[in-house]
Amino acid sequence: MAKKKFLSIAEKRTWLADIFRDTCGEYSQADKFKAMIEDTRLAMLENEAAKPDPQQSTLPGIPLELLRHLPPPLSESRQ
C-alpha cells in the first residue's frame, strides 16, 4: 500500500493537542498558543466541511438535475 502524501486534519489536530498539552517544557508558551490557534482554524475547517452542500437536493426523492430545470420563484412584487 502506498504511503499517504499528506496528514489528515485529525492527525494534525492530534499533533497540535500534544504540543498544547506539553508538561515537560519542550514547547514554549508561544508554541502552545500557536498550536491552539492552528487547532481552532482546523476545527473551523472541519465544521465547514460537515455542513450540507447547498447544491444538493433538500427535497427527498427529487434529483437535483430535475430541480435545475424549474423556473426561478416569482419575486414578491410580481405576486
Image (cartoon, rainbow, N blue to C red):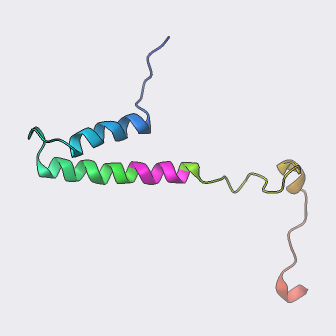
Q: Is residue 64 above or below residue 19?
A: below
What range is drawn magenta here? 42-48
From the viewer's side, name the closer residue of 45 and 14.
14
Q: Residue 51 in the image: x percent, y percent? A: 60, 54
Q: Residue furthest left?
A: 25
Residue at point 78%, 56% (across, down): 58
Q: Residue 26 in the image: x percent, y percent? A: 10, 37
Q: Does the segment drawn in magenta span residue 47?
A: yes
Q: Is residue 31 above or below residue 3?
A: below
Q: Is residue 75 left or right of residue 56?
A: right
Q: Is residue 29 left or right of residue 60?
A: left
From the viewer's side, name the closer residue of 17 and 4.
17
**Total marks placed:** 0
Residue at point 91%, 61% (across, down): 70
Q: Quadrant of the C terminus?
A: bottom right
Q: Does the segment drawn in magenta span residue 76?
A: no
